[in-house]
Image (cartoon, rainbow, N blue to C red):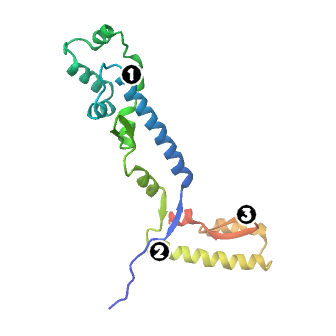
Amino acid sequence: MENTTAFEPIFLYREQELIENQKRLHTQWLAQIQNGIDTASELFDEPLTDDELTQIMLGGWKATEQIMRSKSQFPNAKIETLLDLKGKDSHQAKLALTNVATRSQAIKASIVDGKAVIGENVISELEEAYTHYTKSPDQNRLIYQAKELGDNIQDLLDKNVIHGTDISSICHSLKIIKYVNNDGLKIVPDLVAISKQ
């Protein structure tokens, strides 16, 4: 009977800058969604329910029109006429609702107490999407080999057997190691390159 061990992914790297950029973008989208539903809400005489705000968030201007018709004594009248009678204009609401539906779906937004909120799992899904692990036993072996290779080259470099000027071409040729020059030259596994193997 063959003794096999289960594959266990090894953490490679996290694209933290991309995660932070996406979080900022989602926050901007949330503000745009809130602005859209707030602007549309101003066209109504009474406060809207969370369900009605959700309809507006997901359906944009068309949903706003439908809700207006359902609340009007004149459901067949033109929306512009109904708004003119109230001294209101739809232009700002139409602009504010541009892209609200697609962005709210992208961040799985919902309405809670009149406020747009980002979906519960969106941030964790985002972090998961930009966090990379090995995908196979071969990649795991490559990490260990790259570390050992890097340590050996580092040792040769420290003993002046090879020169720092040669390191760039060596690392480039091997593709699984790279050099960093923080506090002196250091040879390390190239986790991004390994993740693509």
Mark 1 and mark 2: Cα distance apart in space = 55 Å
Whether residue 99 is situated above or below residue 128 in the rendered picture: above
Coordinates of residue 69 in the picture (x, y in percent): 22, 19
**Is 32 situated left or right of 87 in this image?**
right
Coordinates of residue 50 in the picture (x, y in percent): 29, 34
Q: Which mark is residue 182?
A: 3
Q: Secondary structure at mark 1?
A: helix
First-in-chain label (3 vs 1): 1
Q: Which residue is mark 2?
A: 138
> How many labels were placed on the picture?
3
Q: Quadrant of residue 183?
A: bottom right
Q: Secondary structure at mark 2?
A: helix
First-in-chain label (3 vs 2): 2
Whether residue 15 is situated above or below residue 87 in the rendered picture: below
Amino acid type of the residue that numbered disc 3 sits on in the rendered structure: Asn
Q: Which residue is mark 1?
A: 93
Amino acid type of the residue that numbered disc 2 sits on in the rendered structure: Asp
On-image quarter of the N terminus: bottom left
Amino acid type of the residue that numbered disc 1 sits on in the rendered structure: Ala
